[in-house]
Image (tube, grey):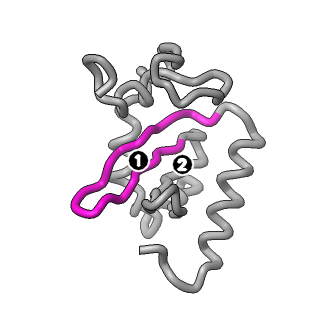
Amino acid sequence: MDGKYEHTFIHLTNKDEFHKSSDPNDRIPDPRRAERIGWNRAIIENYKCNESCKNCEKILYFEEYYKKNVRAYFLFKDVKFLVIIEKRQNYNLLITGYYIEYDNAMEKYIKKYEKYKMQKTPLT
């Protein structure tokens, strides 16, 4: 909890403009993130549409280690939106979801996806 709000809620509705702090109190409200809060669930629930989806570039799924846990990334290229979930022992924890504003950030995530695809074994 961060005050009266869940830490994830703060991440979903506020942004850290300069990515310099881990203190949630340094984040500023972002109305655009709040408007898109429902996208997180829709992307997670529909990422497997890749088998039948013909009109979009699909939701790219990849994983990587973060500290001692595995994080799952859902990158919806068409709308430049990323959702991050952390896999815990008995549950999955929604970390954040946000619109990717900059092309270089999008390219970074696409490279991570391509690297993940080339792996011989899954992380979990």
From the viewer's side, name the closer residue of 63 and 54. Answer: 63
State whether residue 21 is above or below residue 55: above
Q: Which of the labelled discs sits on residue 101, or is there none? A: none
**SS label for mark 2:** strand
Residue 62 colored magenta? no
From the viewer's side, name the closer residue of 118 and 17. Answer: 17
The reply to whether dot 1 and dot 2 touch (C-beta < 8 Å) is yes
State whether residue 119 is above or below residue 109: below
Using the rendered view, name the quadrant where residue 99 is placed.
Answer: top right
The magenta region covers 82-100
User: Are there few (<14), some (14-19), or many (20+) residues within 10 Å of tag 2?
Assistant: many
Spot occupied by residue 75 in the image (x, y as percentages of width and height): 54, 51
The residue wearing badge 1 is 43
Q: Tell whether 5 sits left or right of 118.
A: left
- What's the residue at 25%, 17% (across, down)? 4
Q: Which of the labelled discs sits on residue 76, or is there none? A: 2
